[in-house]
Image: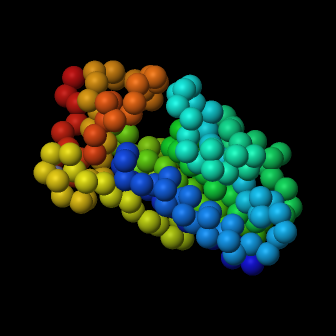
């Protein structure tokens, strides 16, 4: 039986947030007493225009749903699903903070994974609100691309776009690199 709790996994890009989320869901899968373990949880991804296929989608297949409005989760959820996981949650609107609270109050375990800060180093509003409600926070760090220390918490944008959400077909590794606080320089123009 899963306890109702709000768990948050956060950090910069390439810090292993989704891998940590997958690890927790796999544990759940192994521990589930339901004959059909796929009924035990629901995975939510935001609808983004990126063409890449997310790894989490390939792993959990029919349990993964893409939404654009956080409220949509209530239409997707079945009574047996006592765990709801959100990946890339920073892309969903701030109302997600109220939605996850409702889910916890309905007795569910909620795991939210998302970026801590934008490319300018400012908090992602949705994640900031959720972090203020979290009962368990796990900070993922990456290796800083400049100094090599294992404590990068920010994502440095390598291309010149000033859009908050960079939509491209390129590999994210050519667009961002992880930096520690000391090595991060926000864009100046
Ligand atoms: Zn560094």
Q: Quadrant of the N terminus?
A: bottom right
Measured as percent of width and height from the top left, residue 5 is found at 63, 70
Q: Residue at x 46, y 22 (%)?
A: 169
- Depicted 158 relative to depicted 138: above or below: above
Q: Residue at x 26, y 29 (%)?
A: 158
- From the viewer's perspective, tell me whether residue 114 is left or right of residue 184: right
Q: Quadrant of the C terminus?
A: top left
* Residue 79 seen anywhere in this rendered image of the structure: yes
| Residue sitting at x 61%, y 38% | 46
Could you tell whether 92 is left or right of 150 in the image?
right
From this view, report whether residue 22 is shown above or below residue 184.
below
Q: Position of residue 89 (x, y in %)?
A: 55, 46
Residue 35 in picture, x, y percent from top left? 84, 69
Q: Does residue 173 sit above or below 16 in this rendering?
A: above
Q: Residue at x 40, y 50 (%)?
A: 116
Q: Nearer the viewer, residue 124 or 84?
A: 84
């Amino acid at each position: 039986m899963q306890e109702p709790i709000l768990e948050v996994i956060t950090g910069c890009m390439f810090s292993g947030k989704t891998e940590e989320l997958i690890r927790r869901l796999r544990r759940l899968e192994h521990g589930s007493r339901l004959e059909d373990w796929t009924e035990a949880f629901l995975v939510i991804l935001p609808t983004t225009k990126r063409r890449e296929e997310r790894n989490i989608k390939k792993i959990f297949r029919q349990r993964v749903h893409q939404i654009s409005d956080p409220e949509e989760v209530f239409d997707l959820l079945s009574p047996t699903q006592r765990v709801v996981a959100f990946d890339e949650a920073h892309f969903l609107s701030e109302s997600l903070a109220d939605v996850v609270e409702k889910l916890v109050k309905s007795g569910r375990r909620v795991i939210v994974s998302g970026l801590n800060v934008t490319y300018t180093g400012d908090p992602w509003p949705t994640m900031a609100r959720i972090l203020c409600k979290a009962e368990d926070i796990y900070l993922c760090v990456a290796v800083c691309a400049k100094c090599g220390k294992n404590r990068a918490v920010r994502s440095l944008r390598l291309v010149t776009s000033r859009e908050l959400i960079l939509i491209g077909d390129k590999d994210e590794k050519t667009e961002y690199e992880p930096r520690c606080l000391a090595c991060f320089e926000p864009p100046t123009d």
